[in-house]
Structure formats: structure tokens, C-alpha cells
Image: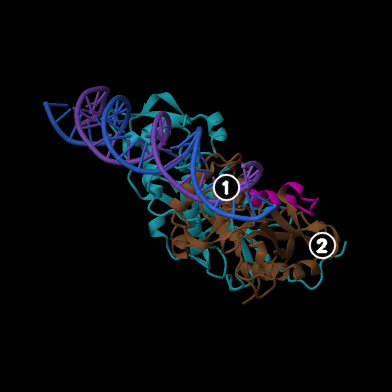
Chain colours: A cyan, B brown, C purple, D blue
Amino acid sequence: MQKYHNQTRLLLAVDCIVFGFDGELLKILLIQRGFEPEKGNWSLMGGFVQPDESLDQSANRILKQLTGLDGVYLEQLQTFGDPGRDPKERTASVAYFALIDTSKYEKQISHDYHAEWFPLKKIPKLIFDQPAMVEMARKKIRYKAALHPILFELLPAKFTIPQLQNLYESVYNTTIDKRNFSKRVLATKLLIKLQDKDKSGSKRGAYYYQLNMQNYYAKFQAFLNFIPNPDNLTT
Amino acid sequence: MQKYHNQTRLLLAVDCIVFGFDGELLKILLIQRGFEPEKGNWSLMGGFVQPDESLDQSANRILKQLTGLDGVYLEQLQTFGDPGRDPKERTASVAYFALIDTSKYEKQISHDYHAEWFPLKKIPKLIFDQPAMVEMARKKIRYKAALHPILFELLPAKFTIPQLQNLYESVYNTTIDKRNFSKRVLATKLLIKLQDKDKSGSKRGAYYYQLNMQNYYAKFQAFLNFIPNPDNLTT
DNA sequence: TCAAAAGTGTTATCCCTACACCCATGC
DNA sequence: GCATGGGTGTAGGGATAACACTTTTGA
């Protein structure tokens, strides 16, 4: 079959906004770009979509290169395609965001790519229209996490309720009453209490929990109204 | 500046899922495709992104061609980019959904394009991966309308509360108690009651309302929990 | 006068929020 | 024994959901 006539072809890229949580702050992973233009400047991890791969495959490939991780929570965010966004050549970029458990993350690979974690409030100057991508991703996870239990993806398999509460407080830049928080979390039936405790945060120790995966998948939708008063809930 | 080396360029298209409401059913607008492959088959309205336009501009241009309308509610949905989705040549497509007031819609233009409205439950066979686009758009508006007052975009500037309730019941395939519905709608302060009535639906007539635009923009976010029991609320 | 749709108010329930004290342990 | 963070219960208020009758008017 012949190709379409008189149409312009352009480059298609994927850029990933990778979120991680260190127990205190929500951070994203950036690299120092390895080629021109903007070589050496901070950038999201990205790459061009290859002829034989889908967009999701492309994002997963890039993410694996950057973090060493498979099976990461990855979701397509938006496509950015303004004509002048890459000065070198017209390129549309499909932005994805990823939520990773930083405890599984391979520092070795990070080092190869000159990657570094930055708190959301201290993002350096980014190339092209990537600041808009990051901002959209930030809004998206706040929006989505208010409705669905995605933030568990940022925690290790075993976590404590105070850790979880820190995460929510950090994502929404708010404080939550710990009695109400634990009541609501436990009421979802998403958590299974384990026998052992995390003693790193206190002398008494906090019980570990793990996700009840059956309920997690069943309730992934229908997790509405979880956050009382997020300070900025925008699409 | 030179171009990027050793990378494949590909076609980038935009496809629009155009929703309308005829007072009874939620429908989408389809056209009979005018060129190969799949010439003559039912398709979403789409086109290739031109060198000098952004994605939003491209979607607006296509929508104007199809409906004659400017200033339509239009939102980027997802980009579809599987390698084989268009058998003729690799093409990624950015799907947009639009909500239009069918009373403003120009039948003339529709006729030129062999366009036709189809109820969501009676969509004909569509080309390529467009069935997935339509399904995603359907889920998206159910999701979003549960949280934000977007469905007003489907109604004329003057509408009645029973019309609005029909729309919600149609979108969510549910029934709502009319006393509770009108209480909740009026509690939002989004509506301004007018003096005249719509007598087409009943002998007594129903008061017309119009949107309070100040409140509409202010409350566009924060419209949570509007639908009691949608029968399928999925991302 | 009757049929058909519009309009309206009250009550019970549930969920959310505010709030304070005891527990366990390492130092 | 004391400082630090972990864990738990209750009561009041606000929002939601269930529910039925009256009004209007064209035919």
C-alpha cells in the first residue's frame, strides 16, 4: 500500500516524569541531558519512539533504562506538540508519569545517567516545555490520588500507617488528624496488618501493613473523597 | 541547527470524538471516510497535524470543519500510537473529545461531510483503533462529569432542570430522584432562574435556567460527588 | 375533568470532623 | 523516669437519601 501524500512526518518522543517518595518529600528524577541542544542541562528522561514499539512500550523501555525497574506504575499524561517546542526540529512528545518505590531503585543506573532526585519545590530549570509537563503531572497525581489509591505505588511492599500519612500530607501539602486518617484508611479494607514493626521511626515502633491486593484491584475505582481539604485540586 | 540523526519521523493525526445530546440520548458524530484505506466506512472526524499548528489548533480546525462551530469545549484525551494501527503507514493519533450544543450545530456542513449522529449504544463498526478511542472518551466524560459541571456544554444556553436531569440520567444510565436532583443542582448556585418557561415538554411548562458564569468558572473544580450511584465509573 | 409533567419539604441516617489521653520503649 | 512517636474512641453537625403530595394547564 502506498503512503499518505503531501503530509509532514515528524519526530515523536516520550518523556517520563518519575515520582518517588523518600519518607519526607515527594521528588522527581531528572537527568543531565546527554546531547544537543541543551546538552548538560536538567531534563526529564525521554527518548524517541522507535519504529516497532508502542507508546507504552517506549515509556517502559525508557523507564527501565533510567531506574532499572520493570512493572512500574506508568500512565500516559498528555501529548505536547507545539510547533516550536524543540528548536532543533519539530517533535511531539507524549508525557508519561511514573510512580516508583525508591527502595527498589538502582542507584548504579542513576549514576550512569547523572540522574538526581529533586523535591517538587526545588526543581531546577528544565529544557523546552518540560516545566509544563511536570506541573501537569503534579496536578494529575493530586487529582487522581484523591480518588484512587495510587500513592501506595510510592511505598515499599511493607509500610506503616504513619509513613502513609506522611505521604498524603506531603502530596497535598496539608496536615491530617492521625486518628481520622487511620480510621479512614483501615475502613477501606485495603490494608493487612502484619506482626512486625518498623522501629526506625520511634522507640515503640509502628506496625507494618501490606496491601490486600484483591481489595486493591476491586476498589481501585471508587476511592472517592479521601482527602478532606487539599489545598489545590485542579485537573 | 541540524536535525536529529537516525530517527524515524512519522505522521501525527488528530481524531475528535464529538458528543451531543438530543434531549434523550447521548450521541457521537461520525463521518464516512473520504479516502483510502477504509474509504466510505464510518470514522471519527480527524486529520493530520500541519507543520505550523499546535495540537489544540489542529483539533479546533478539524472541529470547525465538521460542525461549523468555534469555541467548543475540547479536551485532549489520549494519544494512540501502536505501530500497526493504520495499515497504510505508521501514524500516531492524538484523540480529543468535544462537547457541543447540537442546537448550534450546522446541518449544512454535516451534510457535506456525510456526517451522522449515532447513539452511544448503536455505534457502527469504526476504522482502526477508533472503537477504543470512543470507549475511552465515554469513560472520560462519565468520570469528569461526576466531578465537574461539564455537561452544561451539551445544553443550549437556556435549559430546564428536567432537561438537565435527563442528560445526567442518560450519561450515567441511571435514574435520580427529582427532588434531590433539583436541590443539589440549585445548591451549587450555578444556575440563574429565568422568567420564561419551556412549554414543549409539558402543559404546565418548566422554568428555563441559565448558567451563572462567574460561579461556573469558580466552581469548575470542586464539584465532587455529584452522582449518587453511577453504574460504572471508570478512569 | 383528567392526564402528564413540574415543583416542593421533612425526616432519618450516615459520614465526616473535631478533639485528648494512654501506651510502649530506648535512652 | 522521661521523652518520643504510636495507637485508639466518642460525640456533634452537616450532608445525603428516601419518600408523596400539590400545582398547572392543554386537551
Identify residue for label 1: A74
Q: Nearer the viewer, residue B207 or A132?
A: B207
- Span highlighted in magenta in the image: B121-140
Residue B35, numbered circle: none
What is the chief secondary structure element of the magenta stretch? helix
Q: Nearer the viewer, mark 1 or mark 2?
A: 2
- Asked whether residue A6 appears in the rendered view, the answer is yes
Identify residue for label 2: B33
> Which residue occupies 66% across, 67% down?
B104
Q: Chain of mark 2?
A: B
> Which residue occupies 72% across, 70% down?
B65
- Asked whether residue B226 appears in the rendered view, the answer is no
Q: Is residue A58 above or below residue D18?
A: below
Mark 1 crowd level (few <14, some 14–19, many ≥20, 10 Å Cα): some
Mark 2 crowd level (few <14, some 14–19, many ≥20, 10 Å Cα): many
Judged from this view, the residue extending furthest toward the bottom is B1
Is residue B230 rendered magenta in the image? no
Image coordinates for residue B233, horizontal then vertical, percent = 58, 42
Q: Is residue B117 above or below residue C25?
A: below
